[in-house]
Every structure is written in structure tokens, then in C-alpha cells.
Image: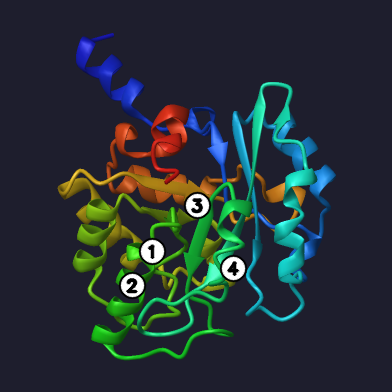
Amino acid sequence: MSDKYLKEEESLLSTGDFLLDVHTHTVVSGHAFSTVNEMVAEARNKHLKVYGITEHGPGIPGTCDPLYFRNMYVVPRQYGDMRLLMGAELNIIDYEGSLDITDEVYWPCFDHVIAGLHQLCYTDGNSEQNTSAFIGAMENPHVNIISHPCDGTASSFDIEAVVMTAKRTRTLLELNNSSLNPIRHKRLAVPYFFRMLELCKRYDNPIVVSSDAHHTSQIADFSNALRLLREAEFPKELIVNTDVDLFVSFLK
């Protein structure tokens, strides 16, 4: 077997390369189906090194009261050799990038903060307005990750400007496995996420891949994302899931 072939094989991503999954939901989010203990147990079964639970912010109907977030300190953060992060997926609610939790008393409660657009909480604007919403959220020093930016909630935005701002602010853009589910989304998001990957590769900007699991069976399921990463020939070294220390460096 030639050296060239060996190098090509080593460069191919596999499920085993993923050491963390930091965007998931439990029953507390109101539309998920497994408990914290069930999700943690399954994350350990999947041999994750870092696992994150991120309940929806208060703008989503049926989710937890903000008081829930203030009490997350009672949950252990270490389970064997797996680190647990208790965070939130907050909602971007306007074109300035405001979030649905702003009170300073909450920021110390989160191990990590994801911010995203959801149709229940955000009115789609024009390209300039939607771009401003993403950029405003990334300028927030508490935000670590932008969830599923290309899933269609923002019908249009300047992807290159968002990628450049992510690099400048050290905010991770997410490749969301659930958003790429062909049954749920009919692959409408694929070309937009592909464009995001192209730009992140061009500008040497790391990304995070997430399952967005709402049930134990979905934890560390990156199958849809993996296909797109391979198609885009996206480099392993720009995927923080493959390097725990690299991911931790993005926790502001």
C-alpha cells in the first residue's frame, strides 16, 4: 500500500474521531424525550470525553423556567472520564443579536452558551438584518457557539461576513446533524452548510459538529454531518470535536 494511500485513509473522518457532543436537549426543553440521567448514561456509552446539555431559552414554548438554569450547579460535572457541561441554547430575538436571557445574574450559571435563530422567536428579515442578528450575537462575550446558522430560519444572510466575524470573535459555527436530516429538512440546508464549510476552510476557521439530540438514540449521531464534511474535504484539524483542548479553548 502506497504512502499516499495511507495518508488519504488517515485523513478520512470517522465516528470514532468525535470526542464531544455539546448541543443536546432533555425533557426539560419541552419537546425532547429523555432525562438528564438517561442522556448522560448514553453519552458515556458512546465514550464521549465531553458531553453538553443545552436546554432551550425561555422564548421556546414549553421549555424550562430561567430558575432552572440558576440551579444547574447541583448537577455533577464529572462522570468517570467524561466531563459534563450544563449550558443553554438561547434564542436570538432581534436584528441586533439580543438574546432571550440578558440578566447578568445568569451568565455564571452556564458552562457554555449556544445562540441560535428559531422561527418561534425570530422574524426573518432581509439579508442585512439577518447578518446583523448573527454578528450581534457573536459580539456577546458570553456566546460560544452559533447553532445551525444555515438551517433556513434566516432565509438569506451574508455567510462570508458571519464566518469572518466568527473567526474574529472566536465563536464556533455549528454543523448541525439534525438540520441535515433528509427526512426532516429535505436537504434544503445542505448547499448553505456546504458553503459555510468552504469558507471556514478558506479562512482557517474551526467549527463544531453537534447532534442536537432530543433523545438518547441521537447522541453522537453525526452521520449526516459526516457525509457533508467528507464531500467538502473539510480538514480534521478544524473540527473541535476531534480535540478536547481545542474545544475548551473556545469556552470564553
- Tell me, for residue 136, which label it has, or none: 2
**Of label 3 and label 4, which has the lower sequence position?**
4
Which disc number belongs to residue 109?
Answer: none
Camera-nearest label, 3 or 1: 1
Residue 173 appears at what percent x and percent y?
Answer: 37, 56
Disc 1: which residue: 140
Q: Earlier in the sequence, mark 4 or mark 1?
A: 1
**Tag 2 and tag 3, C-beta contact below 8 Å:** no
Q: Is residue 118 above or below residue 244?
A: below
Tell me the CA gap for discs 1 and 2: 7 Å
Query: CB under 8 Å between callouts 1 and 2?
Result: yes
Residue 28 relative to residue 169: left or right: right
**At x 58% / y 47%, what residue is drawn?**
111
Residue identifier under label 3: 224
Left or right of 69? Residue 101 is: left
Residue receiving disc 4: 183
Gap between marks 4 and 1, in whole Å?
34 Å
Asked if 198 appears above or below 191 in the picture, the reply is above
Mark nearer the N terminus (2 vs 3):
2
- Residue density around tag 4, few if under 14, some if 14–19, many if 20 or more, within 10 Å: few
Sequence-first tag of 3 and 1:
1
Q: CA distance from mark 3 to mark 1?
A: 30 Å
